[in-house]
Image: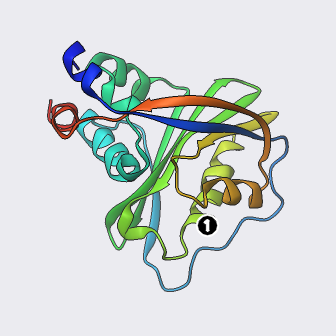
Amino acid sequence: MTGEKSQAAETLSATVTRLEMTQPPSVHPPPPMGEPLAVMRCRSMPLHYYRYLYDRVGRKWHWTAALQLSDAELEARLKDEKTDIRVLYLDGAPAGYFEICRPGPHETVLVHFGLMEHAIGRGLARWFLGEAIRAGWETGPLKMSVETCTLDHPAALGLYQKMGFEPVRRRQDSVRKLSPAARKEALYR
């Protein structure tokens, strides 16, 4: 993004809450009845597909950071063995994804989690978050963490808490909105 585009972009304020879980839950929510669902781990994700997922899940919630990464930066992140991305499919079509990072042997970070707009309101979020939590604990860390902010879905903080995460810290931050032109440029490079 050029300096001119950056300066013209609107900035949004947000309260960011960091949450942690220090032991895996003993029970995971069952999948919703009657929905044809699959969660697949993607070990070699093309850059354009990652950007598509990120944009479709996060556009309404002002996710912009990953769209501003260069191809080289994003490729390094996706190829890093510490990164684990799993895509939710609903009736054969992408419906959401989660991204986990394991910065060390003792911690797992839920970097991104969300559903696409057509999947919201269908009773999938709790079950899908349970799948993300299960994946996060697969390597036996001492804790799992996630951050959410006041720009995310209004139910996000409550859902994380219902699933066993506890708030440990809050901070103020800001997000620079992408203009339609900057978003298009990021998605179609």
Tell me how many marks there are: 1
Residue pictured at 69% horizontal, 54% vertical: 160
Viewer-proximal residue among 4 and 137: 4
Instruction: State whether residue 32 is above or below residue 132.
Output: below
Instruction: State whether residue 95 is above or below residue 102.
Output: below
Query: Residue 136 at what x, y percent from top left?
Result: 66, 43
For residue 15, side relative to residue 188 (left or right):
right
Q: How is the image coloured?
A: rainbow
Query: Residue 77 at what x, y percent from top left?
Result: 43, 24
What amino acid is labelled 1 in the image?
Answer: Trp
Viewer-proximal residue among 13 and 118: 13
For residue 121, side relative to residue 89 (left or right):
right
Q: Which residue is mark 1?
A: 127
For residue 169, side relative to residue 131 (left or right):
right
- Report crowding for label 1: few under 14, some 14 to 19, many 20 or more residues within 10 A (C-alpha): some
Viewer-proximal residue among 47 and 170: 170
Residue pictured at 51% horizontal, 25% vertical: 81
Q: Quadrant of the N terminus?
A: top left
For mark 1, give the secondary structure: helix
Kindly give the residue lying farthest to the bottom in the view shown.
34
Query: Residue 161 at what x, y percent from top left?
Result: 75, 55
For residue 46, side relative to residue 118 (left or right):
left
Q: Quadrant of the C terminus?
A: top left
Dividing the picture into quadrants, the one containing residue 43 is top left
Viewer-proximal residue among 155 and 164: 155
Query: Residue 40 at what x, y percent from top left?
Result: 45, 54
Kindly give the residue lying farthest to the top in the view shown.
3
